[in-house]
Amino acid sequence: MKSLSIIGLCIASAVLYGILHDQITARVCVEYFTIGHPPIFPTESPTLIGLGWGIVATWWAGLILGVPLAIAARVGRRPKREARSLVRPIAGLLLVMAIGAAISGVVGYLLAINDGIRLVDWLAERVPPDRHARFLADGAAHLASYGLGFLGGAVVIVRVWRLRGRLDTTSQARA
């Protein structure tokens, strides 16, 4: 049951991050969702799109983090970690992802307005030209969030496992 609470924490954290992230990016360029993604429900509302895609596009990432994190935190003889002890590492990961997304979004936008990157093929035809740079900014922000999330998630998992080993060594030294 305690492993399930860790998985639940990861899923809830990922979904909350996704909703907040997509509330911003849907307002930067709603076409990123309405043209660049398959429709999940018929609306052009940035609020509803951010809510829907924030859930659909992130719950599975939370699961992918949650299962190995629960294993790293709970399996074996080492001292076990509770879900509440993982709130800070997960919050730190989300903060790094948010900062990385913001920086990447700005860089993507600047590259786009200076012709460093461009929309191509069917996207270039369907997205209004005055929205291309914003679309690319959103794409860069999303790529950064996923990339940093997976890389940072691996770091969190390894750190939790290693910390459990240190806690075990400390408790053995006291015995």
Image (cartoon, helix red, strand yellow):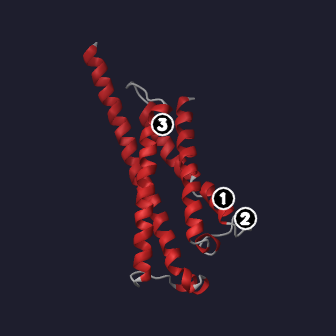
Q: Nearer the viewer, mark 3 or mark 2?
A: 2
Say what secondary structure mark 2 lies in: loop
Is residue 46 shown left or right of residue 157?
right
**Residue at the spot 31% in from the left edge and 19% down from the top edge:** 171
Mark found first going from the N terminus, 1 or 3: 1
Contact, CB < 8 Å: mark 1 with mark 3?
Answer: no
Q: Quadrant of the N terminus?
A: top right
Q: Are marks 2 and 1 in contact (CB under 8 Å)?
A: yes
Disc assigned to residue 41 = 2
Q: Residues within 10 Å of mark 3 (few under 14, many from 20)?
A: many
In the picture of the structure, the residue carrying the numbered disc 3 is 70
Q: Of label 3 and label 2, which has the lower sequence position?
A: 2
- Determine whether 77 is above or below 121 in the image: above
Mark 2, Cα crowd under 10 Å, few <14 / some 14-19 / many 20+, is few
The relative height of residue 162 versus residue 134 in the rendered view (above or below) is: above
The image quadrant of residue 58 is: bottom right
Residue on which the image places disc 1: 52
Are the residues tagged 3 and 2 within 8 Å (C-beta)? no
